[in-house]
Image (cartoon, rainbow, N blue to C red):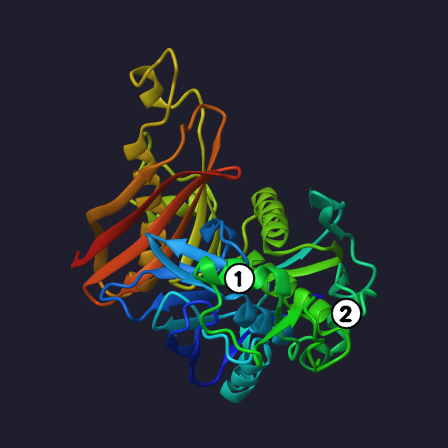
Amino acid sequence: MPRNQRSLKSAVELEGVALHSGRTVKLRLEPAAVGTGLVFRRSDLEDPVEITALPGNLINSARRTVLRTDNQDVGMIEHLLAACQGLKVDNLVIQVEGDELPGFDGSVKPYADALRKGVIVEQKAERKVLSVQEPVLVRDSGNEIIALPPSGEGLRVRYLPELPEGFDATPVLFDSADGNFEREVAPARTFVRAEEVESLLAAGFGKGATAENTLVIGGEELPELRLDREPTRHKIADILGDLMLLGADLHADLIATRSGHTLNQELVRLLRAQLEALELAVEPRETGYEIRELFRILPHRYPFLLVDRILEMEGTRRAVGIKNVSINEHYFQGHWPGHPVMPGVLQLESMAQVAGVLLLRRLEHTGKVAVLASIDKVRFRGAVVPGDQLRIEVDTLRLNRHRGQVRGTAKVGLRTVAEAILSFALVDV
């Protein structure tokens, strides 16, 4: 059964040393509205962007989870994300003074404790759920992770490790329905193999690592463990953290064999694509709009109405719309008719129209309208051709009495084809 979304009652501030950079980092976890998700802001920067914890913002990185938006990074987020997964906290704004979160004692527990300190509260909207229907497998050189249809309630993760002599390598099973996350997973610390230490230090990793926050396994001495099969339990924590990028609760049985962040993240990308495909296949939510309702909201008409449907609205925070690109579009008559391609400026106009629907929810009773004022950081990443369905995602970055700013992303299937920052002036009618 779906549950309601959750956030914090009050903000919590933390400070600690980053495991890789070795720098002291301040962090603030702030309550956020329904539908916000987990959003990072680099408070050390003069003009920080919002970096949302979704697979589209993942970048390839060794040994950790890193997100990037508009060339701003935030990394080592997996421990905080695992705490949010384990305690079911869905909406937060995370202010961080740097590009790496603190490592604390190397486990998820300090983040779980911080969430408890902020008091977890239920909100008045359901959390999205993805229930796996068919097996999903990712594999690389004998390492693999497979998602199977759920055998019970919620998420079950079984991890099969490969550990040096002297360590218990029997599998560990975590079942989210048992409520044992804080006791069986959260305290488990990160680890490194003894033969990797020198090369990782030479590559600039581990400057903040100590014997207290990082287990060294495979060396001459066996480290003292906090709990039974601690390295394997930390691997489960990493999986839970990476799965938080799905943006929905996952109901599935996962079996992971020697998997790490690379495979975990590839799995969550595939699952996110499934989630988005299912959203496209269903009727709009109560907060979505069919074309007849769009006529009442937007002033545009054929041939300049470039949105066919609004799939979902999350307050004034986020909107998702679609545009079905047909060979009958008027612009194909003159825009490369032999090889028809949707003009990039019209993709931007589609974003602006979805943004207009979003902003008009705020302006409905104010006597103002949103007028496009500027477009920044535009990137076109692929062609849009007849037969494509354009999925337009718009997220609010800033909104006050006089101005609004959104980030727009246009996708065809898994491909991002365009993205931009759009600014609007909110003017009197």
On the image, the x and y values in percent for residue 355 come to 34, 51
* Residue 183 visible in the picture: yes
On the image, the x and y values in percent for residue 231 come to 70, 69
Q: CA distance from mark 1 to mark 2?
A: 36 Å
Give 339 or 319, whichever is nearer the viewer: 339
Q: Residue at image x 72%, y 66%?
A: 1
- Circle 1 residue: 198
Mark 1 and mark 2 lie on one chain; the one further toward the N terminus is 2
- Circle 2 residue: 175
On the image, the x and y values in percent for residue 192 come to 61, 66
On the image, the x and y values in percent for residue 187 come to 65, 80
Give 60 or 37, whichever is nearer the viewer: 60
Q: Is residue 231 above or below residue 254?
A: below
Q: Is residue 295 above or below residue 48?
A: above
Q: Quadrant of the C terminus?
A: bottom left
Q: Residue at image x 35%, y 13%?
A: 337
SS of the residue under disc 1: helix
Which residue occupies the extreme top position in the image? Answer: 338
Q: Residue at image x 79%, y 65%?
A: 165
SS of the residue under disc 2: strand
Where on the picture, by quarter, is residue 43?
Answer: bottom left
Q: Which mark is residue 331?
A: none
Q: For label 1, count other residues whose C-alpha is less than 10 Å away and answer few (under 14), some (14-19) or many (20+).
A: few
* Residue 36 visible in the picture: no
Q: Is residue 206 above or below residue 373?
A: below
Q: Quick check: 425 left or right of 162?
A: left
Amino acid type, label 2 = Asp
Amino acid type, label 1 = Glu
Q: Is residue 35 above or below residue 210?
A: above
